[in-house]
Amino acid sequence: MVKKLLYQLDSDARPSIFDNVVAYDGGADQVISFGGVLPQDLSSMAQGAIFTRAPKDKKNTAFFIGGSNLVQGEKLLEVLQSHFYGNFSVSVMIDTNGANTTASALVAMLSRTRSLEGLQAVVLAGTGPVGQRVSTLLASEGCRVVFTGRDDSKNQFCEQTISQRFGLSVQSRVLTDNQVRQELLQKADIVVATGASGVILLSRDEWSFLPNLKLLADASAAEQGGIEGIDQMDKGVTYGSIMAFGAIGFGPLKLAVHRACVAQLFENNKQVLDVFEIYAKAKELVGQFYSGGQST
């Protein structure tokens, strides 16, 4: 029997153990991990993958692009694809920093609660990989998205990247003082925290009194999350009229999506599983993990 081989390409020096474990759980027979991968390394890797198996067996070879740097991961994907042509290709999944699977699971759960069309969404500390992907997916659902960041030049770069790569419009804001912060939050229907572990981005005293707030989500799985007063395990738990989701609440869906996408890679040799393909899988699976409304 032809073995399912997954080549894990990581721009970091040490390939992610997390991604390696999930790849096996997703059905790969063997995972071959490479760290410190650069764009110039990909020609020989691509050739080794596309020229070694008969057409009917090419589906059993695939690539996974990980690492922690979103820009580097996207460059690896672009260069890798440039070496494919005709039927000389294999399937590829990209989930740099876990951003695509994490954001997909989070937004899929939010979208399960209600239509997101026309809602005002604020993504706090949104210039990291997960924040950018959350902003992208919320915008794709019709939200008016504002993400925050401390560095205006980085904010502008993220805005332009989302616009150019996905054709979606989002806005950014530097929260220069409390008045600017309050003006932004007072309009929010949705607030998502995507900051560094252990940093509180929104206190309970703040979010409890936001007049329009409907949905809260925290992407941090650290003991001290980014939103004070909600629990990591929250999955549609209501606090008054506000529904909350913690990182461990949507974590099982994130893992299931990751595994399912790895399995999907081996269905044929023509797939590229990027943010929207992964989000589609999350929306397909979300009903198995969350039926909507308050969790029990």
Image (cartoon, rainbow, N blue to C red):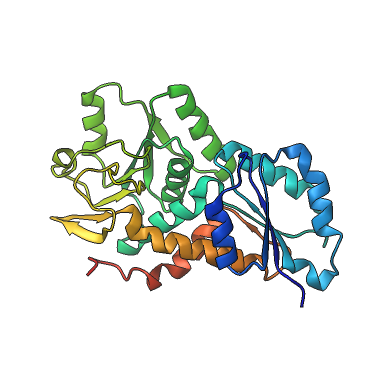
Left or right position of 275 against 8:
left
Residue at the far bottom: name it.
Answer: 1
- Number of marks in the rendered image: 0
Residue 31 image position (x, y, % from top left): 66, 60
Decide: is 147 above or below 140.
above
Decide: is 295 above or below 176.
below
Residue 176 image position (x, y, % from top left): 30, 21
Residue 72 image position (x, y, % from top left): 62, 37
Decide: is 235 above or below 191.
below
Quarter holding the N terminus is bottom right
Decide which of 253, 9 is in the foreground and name it.
Answer: 9
Quarter holding the C terminus is bottom left
Residue 215 in view, yes or no: yes
Q: Which residue is located at x 55 percent, y 60 percent?
A: 21
Left or right position of 159 against 191:
right
Left or right position of 40 against 267:
right
Q: Which residue is located at x 58 percent, y 44 percent?
A: 67
Residue 193 image position (x, y, % from top left): 33, 42
Residue 277 in view, yes or no: no
Q: Which residue is located at x 45 percent, y 53 percent?
A: 102
